[in-house]
Amino acid sequence: LDAKGLLAEKTLGTLMVLTDAKFAEAVTAKAELLSRGREQKPQKLQEETEAFLISSGLSKAEVRKVSSHLSTCFSPDVDGKVKAVFRWLAELRLTKLQINKVVVAFPKIFSCSLTDQLQPAVRWLSELGMDNAQVAKAVIWFPAFIGLSLEDRLKPCVRWLSEIGMDDSQVTKVISSCPQIFTYSLERRLKPLVSWLSDIGMDDSQVAKVLATCPSLCVPTLESNLMPKVQMLRDRGFSDTVIARTINRMPSLLAYSSERWEDRVSVLDAKGLLAEKTLGTLMVLTDAKFAEAVTA
């Protein structure tokens, strides 16, 4: 009885008096019922979760996406966990549609501890100086970051941003507009980017300004995206001093696609229009406006 999980006050007396044959038959039957009950409980929880998600406005396709993740890790308690997460997101001033977007993009949020992980992360962001709107923006834009370790991922990244010269307002701006920065390796991704900008000729304050103004520069890979763009200019006679000055003046220039860079730099070079002043001005134009400008 103990080995099969059937040892209890009610079963002890009832089963002890049976013959060996009847005892074996009864134990087998009860064990099967217990097993089916254990299998049915997660299924019931899954069905309750799906019903709640549908009632919250998720489409059937979105519910399937969320459920496929939940079924691989656990079946959350609807009242104790799922609804609690929805209430917490609402407390962050997210709208119903925004909450649904977060849940679909990051279904793992239901496997995160509300009291030990999610709430402490948001409290810490507030302590950094982020207001409710900034916190909500970051959570909506890239909700997976709140599932990262506060001590191992979030805090070290913020310390590094401060170390490279960003003030508090710049740090909070980076987090709210590019929260995926927390997912990047400091040693393999972020520090090499800063070293590269420094090698071009930027001082510490310029590097901090560039990354604070355009934190999305942390997204593209250095070797396959950013470096080739700068090399295009070097190959056409631009000095590092001019390149550094151009990037410092307009950091978002490097965020444009490699295809746009290749096309427009080639066109400007062929027409004799490639210069420090025209590069930034013409790179931001739509294709139609660019064609009109280079023709004129």
Image (cartoon, helix red, strand yellow):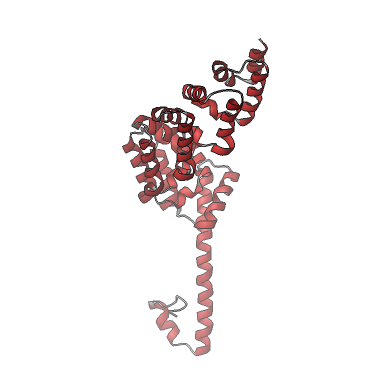
Q: Is residue 210 visible?
A: yes
Residue occupying the point 51% across, 22% down? 242
Of the 4 image quadrants, the one containing the N terminus is: bottom left
Q: Residue 165: give x, y in percent of width and height.
A: 36, 32
Q: Residue 212: give x, y in percent of width and height.
A: 43, 30
* Nearer to me, 11 or 75: 75
* Nearer to me, 263 or 102: 263
* Nearer to me, 113 or 20: 113
Left or right placement of residue 37 versus residue 125 in this view: right
Image: 18 above or below 94 = below
Q: Residue 43: give x, y in percent of width and height.
A: 53, 59
Q: Residue 128: give x, y in percent of width and height.
A: 33, 36
Question: For residue 154, what is the image quadrant?
Answer: top left
Question: For residue 187, what is the image quadrant?
Answer: top left
Please state the total of marks drawn on the protein image. Answer: 0
Residue occupying the point 54% across, 18% down? 276
Left or right placement of residue 191 versus residue 270 in this view: left
Q: Is residue 221 visible?
A: no
* Nearer to me, 54 or 267: 267
Image: 46 above or below 201 = below
In the orientation shown, which residue stands out farthest toward the left?
A: 127
Left or right placement of residue 153 versus residue 272 in this view: left
In the orientation shown, which residue stands out farthest toward the top?
A: 296
Residue occupying the point 56% across, 34% down? 227
Residue occupying the point 53% across, 88% down? 21
Question: For residue 233, what is the image quadrant?
Answer: top right
